[in-house]
Image (cartoon, coloured by chain):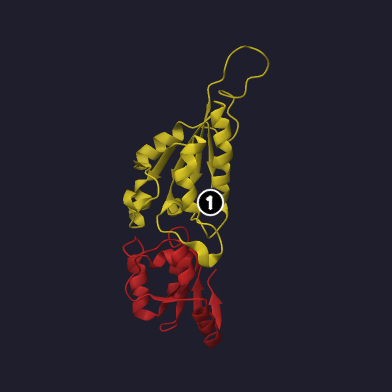
Amino acid sequence: MEAVEPSEHGPQVGGAGEVAPPRKVLVLMRKAPYGSLYNWEGLQTLLIMGAYKMQGKVDVAVAFVDDGVYAITQGQDPRLLGVKALAKTYPALPDFEIERFYVDEQSLADRNLTLNDLVIKPELLDGAGMARLLEQQDAVLPF
Amino acid sequence: MLFTVNKSPFMSGNLESCLRVAPAGTPLVLYEDGVYAAAAGTRVQGLVREALAQHPVYVLEADVKARGIERLIEGVRVIDYGGFVELVEQHPVVPWL
């Protein structure tokens, strides 16, 4: 895995007639939703990536690790903070062709959470599973 | 003195280090991502229970509601912004940022 610009699946230049396979991109959510803007920015990135996915340029997945799991918990009501409930956007992501979601089992357990506490149903991964997922990526975008 | 912690206990050692030095009896306010410490049953519940034996522990209602935390550790007191202001008026504040 390379961080930013892997050449293997890089953009094709000129008219070779070959179609490049989609680059595998993982949006990695590791921050809680309201204490910083990371989570909001990650969501904006996902909505934009959806457009590239539709063009077949990228294959986008989302993983929730550490405090990132708090981004998708049910029952968020930030009206007193005067901001929008970020968790509501996640169930709509499949409409933008973002459909692959993963969550770190240990991060949920540490926070006394289960899949039933979440607004979406991501695939549960253990440490080894998360390592495999990361290994498959051409790029990882951390938020 | 009033100690305040605003970082998640899972991503920062701020709560732990604050509790190591906060004099017994001094109140502690958890706000912003600090409120995650007060959720029941998590990995840091033991730390917060120990804190409750030594300090009054408060959480800011707006931050708890925003994050959808449904069950708090028993003994943690919920305050609104007005309650936070009252505590700040009564004590010199030590923000453990």
Which x, y percent locates residue B39? 37, 65
Identified by mark 1, the residue type is Asn
Check disc 1: other Cα within 10 Å, few if <14, some if 14-19, many if 20+.
Answer: many
Q: Is residue B7 visible?
A: no
Q: Is residue B28 above or below residue A92?
A: below
Between residues B10 and B80, which one lies in front from this camera angle? B80
Shade representing chain B? red
Chain shaded yellow: A
Between residues A141 and A45, which one lies in front from this camera angle? A45
Q: Is residue A47 left or right of residue B48?
A: right
Q: Is residue B42 above or below residue A9?
A: below
Which x, y percent locates residue A22? 53, 25
Which x, y percent locates residue B90? 52, 87
- Of all chains, the one bearing label 1 is A
Q: Secondary structure at mark 1?
A: helix
Q: Name the quadrant containing residue A50.
A: top right
Between residues A55 and B42, which one lies in front from this camera angle? A55
Which x, y percent locates residue A57? 56, 27
Q: Is residue B37 above or below residue A130?
A: below
Question: Which residue is pictured at 44% across the width and 65% down the height?
Answer: B65
Question: Which residue is pictured at 39% across the width and 44% down the height?
Answer: A103
Q: Looking at this rendering, what residue extends furthest in the bottom direction?
A: B90
In the rendered image, which residue does mark 1 sit on?
A39
Q: Is residue A136 visible?
A: yes
Question: Which residue is pictured at 58% across the width and 48% down the height?
Answer: A41
Q: Is residue A137 left or right of residue A130?
A: right
Count numbered badges in the picture: 1
Q: Is residue A124 above or below residue B22?
A: above
Question: Which residue is pictured at 35% across the width and 56% down the height?
Answer: A110
